Amino acid sequence: MRAEVLATSAALGTLPGSGTVAPVEPETVPVGLVDARSDRRLLVRYRVLAFTTAALLIVLVFVGVPLQLAAGQAGVVNAVGTMHGFLYLVYLYFAFELTRRLGVPTWQMILVLLAGTVPFCAFIAERKMTRLYEQRTGEIDAPASSAAGADA
């Protein structure tokens, strides 16, 4: 009986007969990564949106804007700008979710979120987030060139 009282009081964090609360160790829960399958799907969605957003921004800045300014053709800016703007909002959601799950510091999270507004930066941010994900999960992929070189 005494063992049961001690076990119950330890679970509740109280000392029997004293009415005081004993310090209870909090459970250690990983900061973000919960389910390997859903986390991997989140990474893939983030990567697709990062590439798409970056490619559309590059087309917008280096093709659409010069066409609009030099030739007065606003069609590319209107079409690509609208697609980039919509997909950037979706990118923001997935980038925020991924950086939150990876436990990225706030200042780095802001940089990742802003990467979709500067040409070529989303490519760099995507690479860094993928490497961080692989480090945290241990899913580092072997380069294909080393596997091909081993057979030769």
Image (cartoon, helix red, strand yellow):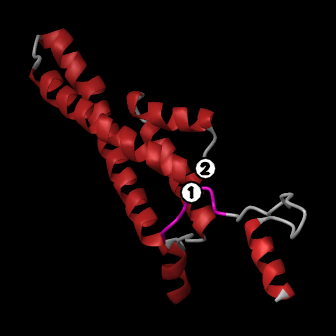
Q: Nearer the viewer, residue 107 or 18?
A: 18
On whether residue 88 falls in the magenta region, the answer is no
Q: Determine the CA span between mark 1 and mark 2.
A: 6 Å
Q: Amino acid at mark 1?
A: Gly
As drawn, is 133 to the left or to the right of 82?
right
Label 1 sits on a secondary structure element that is loop
Label 2 sits on a secondary structure element that is loop
Please identify the quarter of the rendering in which residue 85 is found. Answer: top left
x, y percent for residue 124: 50, 43
Q: In the rendered structure, find residue 32 and report the number of the disc placed on it.
A: 1
Residue that appears at 43% across and 39% down: 122
The residue positioned farthest toward the front in the image shown: 17
Q: Are marks 1 and 2 in contact (CB under 8 Å)?
A: yes
Is residue 150 visible in the rendered image? The answer is yes
Q: Is 142 above or below relative to 40?
A: below
x, y percent for residue 50: 37, 45
x, y percent for residue 109: 55, 38
Image quadrant where one finds the N terminus: bottom right
As drawn, is 119 to the left or to the right of 17?
left
The residue positioned farthest toward the right in the image shown: 18
Which residue position is annotated with label 2?
Answer: 103
The magenta-colored residue range is: 29-35
Residue that appears at 74% across and 72% down: 11
Crowding at dot 2, Cα within 10 Å, few <14 / some 14-19 / many 20+, comes out as: some
Chief SS of the magenta region: loop
x, y percent for residue 26: 74, 61
